[in-house]
Every structure is written in structure tokens, then in C-alpha cells.
Image (cartoon, rainbow, N blue to C red):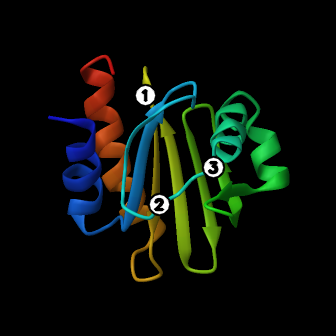
């Protein structure tokens, strides 16, 4: 499966995610993205740094597509943020960074479940 198919089918296709992107783990290259989900390189660099220093995400929040989210969870493999009822989920695999957005009509646990399923699958494949 192509990286774009993972975005289109395994994330957005679940109905739990409305926009998503996959980057290299270092955040220096875009592997696939939803149309219109424009995440700036400096925003991704801050997310990558946030995995190394989760406390910074909790203190400063998460900036994705020029939208600021309050970090409600920050760990070495998973960062979750909220803006009202919308949310952003960032997870790491061995080689990739997945960033997914959910609308106000989906709960964060539902969206997180969909993203975590792909995260686990990619980790099993050594990606």
C-alpha cells in the first residue's frame, strides 16, 4: 500500500479522521497528506521536538496548520491536543510521524483508536 493510501484509507477512510498526513520520523519530508492539510515545516519540527521533550508540548501547546491546540497528553510516542471539540493526534512509529485531525463530531478517544491502529500496524512492519 502507498503512503497516500494509508492516509486516505487507514485514517480518513475510517470516518474518525477528517484530515491526516504522514511525514518521515525526523519531520523533514512529507510522505502523504490529505488535500488542504497544509502543515508548515516549522510546525512539524516543533512536534518532532515535542516527542523528545513532552513537557514543552504541555506548556506551549501544538501548532498545526496555523491552528493552536491545547496539549492534553504528551508522551514519547503520542501527543494529543484539543481546540474546542476538535482534536489533533500525533504519533510516532519506527520511521514515520502520523498527524491526524478529527472534527467536533468525533470524540478524541474514537479518533485516537483509529490512529493507534495504524501506528501499531506500521510498527509491526518495522515502519
Q: Residue at x 24, y 20 (%)?
A: 125
Depth order, front residue of 86/110: 86
Q: Quadrant of residue 53?
A: top right
Quarter of the figure that contains the N terminus:
top left
Contact? badges 1 and 2 (CB < 8 Å): no
Image height check: is 66 above or below 117? below
* Secondary structure state at the residue bearing disc 1: loop
Residue identified by numbered label 3: 40
Residue identified by numbered label 1: 93
Residue identified by numbered label 2: 37
98 on left or right of 76: left
- Residue 117 screen position, x and y as percent: 29, 44
Image height check: is 64 above or below 86? above
Indicate which disc, 1 or 2, sits on the residue closer to the N terminus.
2
How far apart are the alpha carbons under marks 3 and 2?
10 Å
- The label number, if any, that marks residue 22 in the structure image: none
Amino acid at each position: 500500500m502507498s503512503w497516500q493510501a494509508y492516509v486516505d484509507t487507514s485514517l480518513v477512510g475510517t470516518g474518525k479522521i477528517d484530515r491526516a498526513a504522514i511525514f518521515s520520523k525526523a519531520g523533514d519530508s512529507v510522505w502523504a497528506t490529505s488535500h488542504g492539510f497544509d502543515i508548515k515545516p516549522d510546525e512539524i519540527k516543533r512536534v518532532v521536538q515535542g516527542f523528545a521533550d513532552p513537557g514543552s508540548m504541555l506548556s506551549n501547546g501544538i501548532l498545526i496548520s496555523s491552528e493552536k491546540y491545547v496539549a492534553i497528553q504528551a508522551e514519547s510516542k503520542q501527543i494529543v491536543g484539543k481546540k474546542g471539540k476538535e482534536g489533533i493526534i500525533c504519533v510516532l512509529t519506527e520511521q514515520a510521524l502520523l498527524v491526524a485531525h478529527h472534527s467536533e463530531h468525533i470524540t478524541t478517544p474514537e479518533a485516537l483508536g483509529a490512529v493507534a491502529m495504524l501506528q501499531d500496524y506500521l510498527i509491526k512492519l518495522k515502519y
